[in-house]
Amino acid sequence: MTDAMNPSLLTPYALQTEQRDAPLGVGERHPRLSWKLRCRRRGAAQSAYRITVAAHPTDLDTQGCLLWDSGRRASPGTLLIVLDGPAQASATRYHWRVEAWDENGARGGTARSWFETGLLDRADWLGVWVGRDLATLPPYDPPQDDDPEASSLQSPPLQLRRAFHAPSRPARARLYATARGVYEPRLNGSRIGDSELSPGRTEYRRRLQYQTYDVTDLVTDGANVLAVVVADGWWSGYVGFDPRRAAQHYGDRPAVLAQLVMDLTDGSRQVVATGPQRAEQPGSIRSADLLMGQTVDARRHTAGWDAPGRVPAGFRPAAVVETDPGPLVAEPDHPIRVTRNLPAIDVHHRGHSRYIVDFGQNLVGRVQLTVRDAERGQRIVLRHAEVLDNGELYLDDLRRAQASDVYIAGGTGIEMFEPQFTVHGFRHAEIDPYPGVLAAADVTARVVHNDTPWTGSFESSDLMVSQLQSNIAWRQRGNFLAVPTDCPQRDERLGWLADAQIFAPTASRNADVSAFFARWMRDVLDGQDDDGAFRDVAPVMTLACEAAPAWGDAGVIIPWFLWRAYGDRHALESSFDAMAAWVEHVRRHHPDLRWRHRTGNSYGDWLQVGVTTPRDVLATAYFAHSTRIVADTAEVLGRTREATHFRMLHAAIRTVFIESYVHADGSIEGGTQTGYLLALAFGLLPERLVEAAVSHLAADIEERNTTLTTGFVGTALHCPVLAEHGRADLAYALLHQDADPSWQHSIRHGVTTIWERWDGWTDHGGFQAAAMNSFNHYSLGSIGDWLFGRVAGIDQTPSSVAYSELLLRPQPGGRLTWARAEQDTARGHVTCGWDLADGLLTVTCTVPPGATATLLVPTPDLSSVREGAVPAAGRPGVLSLVPRPAGAALRPASGHYVVSAAAPVLTSPILS
């Protein structure tokens, strides 16, 4: 019987190297390996493991052929195990196998995977940077009917080609490539790979990512052509709200660096690298910019330019831009890809040849358009918008971003247009003019984002709540593109730190964002100045200055989040000095320990509604919060002296907060919901005043007809704090509220993502100020963590790391009659859900092997608690029961359980 056929056998699965499945181009000499465990038998756990590594998969079965053998190691560990054998060589594939032993010491199953290293040494790079020779470039001559903006976007993107001869088909061929800009590689007329907008966005002066492609099947015996198209991208295009010249703080023109390495069947190696032999020519793409859009003139397309054969006319030698490869690093996370196609749900003819298309979902990506029987030279413009205003595109909120694509037809019958070097945030697209009748089948929305593996789902009996979760998920897809951006449509699209740290817990419920955030954290650290101050955005913009409270604190919070959610100790080790430096920076500039904005920005609780939380209250609360996290991090890393220092500093800040902002009746200075939420969530109240503060918070909510006043910072804390302090009824009331401001208000108006502000559009006021009014912004979607963690019930204890100690605490309430969630945690598959029917509460849960769990069942009758038909009290060792004030605490071993009990008595405020 194979491992897969024996469900009772403890078996590893989902093997990862550096938090990715079978990655090509790993940049670490000692990569970290992880796996999950499955077993249907209850109580299963790993007691030991063995890792073996070999050059070929068949060698894993022969002891004498192994490159490394860990031996049997007594350990329950499955996460990020450092491959501590010999250092790995460059450009080499390694196969590895893990064996597991169960809790009884019996041999379990095995699983295999592989990884391949990239170019690990600077000397491995033989190519040089090549680009356009501006001295030989003829002046750009746009057609008379071309887009006027195109001529202001410098020169068209690069088209580079290099012909070479291969004596035979290779046994193995790899392309290592990157660009100053964004690029699309091609070989013998075919596109290489499926990644988009490579190499992505980083702090290019510190780090420029390269990609590794397997092109073995594309190289032919004889004549070949390696080609690439390179556009401005984040290197020299429009970025954020800086003027174009300010945005060109990396360079004023794109370039490419690449080398093709072929291992031939005779044992020899052939390398084709970028150099002066490359030829260059502008092609059919006349302009391409991430914010402005892309213009393609099909009349200028040269068929076969990227394939073997005679060099097309017009190609001239490329220029060597630089010989030093620079700060190259292997791409460490999942690339940007097209992840799905959405059909048009409505095509509305607006007169003459103009159409407005509705895709039914606000998304980030681009439009693929089929053009039929257009006259040669006909100019077709695609404009994009998130919402409509009286049936027309609402474009005011785009600010300077044109978000327009232009196609000039070649007149060849059926033509396909899809821009590849731009993205837009949109639900609606205007196509004008379109030749003939535009059918829904002729237009498709292509969804583009970092392809982080989707790992979670939440659903409930309430369609509005389920829609909220869908909106949150689509918001995440739309704004995890190279960096965690604030919005995808206007001239901003920046990696704002507060937005990211607020949303990170929710993001980790939906997808595996471990590698994505770890990579972005390098940009956050790169932005820190010599005094310890982080910046508001990462990568840093030209106009950036010292980060605001809650924004700069992301440099402390996100590494801790990566540790808690994924067990990434390296995130703490690589960030600790920067984390401590931030806290010390704040302390130096605020010696009385009240953070009163003597330096840097201060945004407060951004986009609050009708109130203003005192900024020093918010800032000092975050000062205390970050200091405590730094102390906790020091303890994890065994840095005892620093842990003691920051514990004492945290205690002092907490005392100052209480003395300065907490009144004798438990009220907080300013009296805002955000002020109470921060004090309660961050433990900044004397125990004797906690109940009073909760009462003040509840009273404020109720006095406002059960609506919230919080902005970006406070909203993430609202429902978790209320539920934690016995007011789940109010948390559910806020969840179900559909009056402005609320989550359901926007859903009631048919939106499919999360808005930037609560009042982005209202019945009485219409659209908010266009200068700051995104309809796709994730900060207010931070409630998603609570939906998974308290509504459905998947959580972990305060001391748990990577869900090693599950806290399953479903919280029935509100209008819901059932809710359930699934989450592929770092340790395995976890489920939790509940159902109310006929006075009975039924809870289902799944605990993966190796994890422990506490299941809290809210019930007024302990004797009614059953697992299947058996009283839970009668299942010692499998499902032990402990009485608790609000019900029962069960201790399920790993496995799947269905528990029933008398339903709790629920109360909920009346919504006004």
Image (cartoon, rainbow, N blue to C red):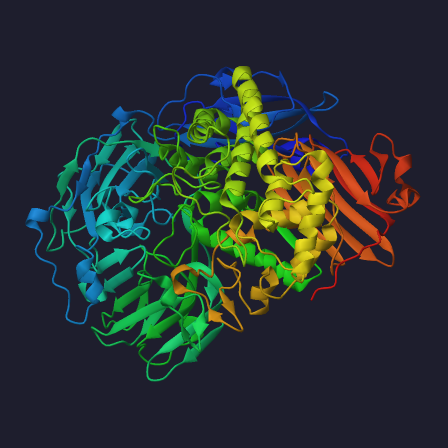
Q: Is residue 61 visible?
A: no
Residue at the extreme bottom of the image, as rendered: 352
Viewed as shown, does residue 321 lie left or right of 423?
A: left
Quadrant in the rendering for residue 29: top left
355 is higher (above) or lower (below) than 105:
below
Q: Nearer the viewer, residue 61 or 801?
A: 801
Q: Quadrant of residue 768?
A: bottom left
Where residue 128 appears, as percent x and y from the top left, is 19, 35
Q: Nearer the viewer, residue 317 or 562?
A: 562
Count of picture labels: 0
Q: Is residue 431 visible?
A: yes
Residue at figure coordinates x 50%, y 39% from the top left: 619
Look at 50% across and 36% down and name the residue there: 558
Relative to residue 149, is residue 646 depicted above or below? above
Residue in front for this viewpoint, 708 or 303? 708
Residue 102's x, y, as percent? 71, 25
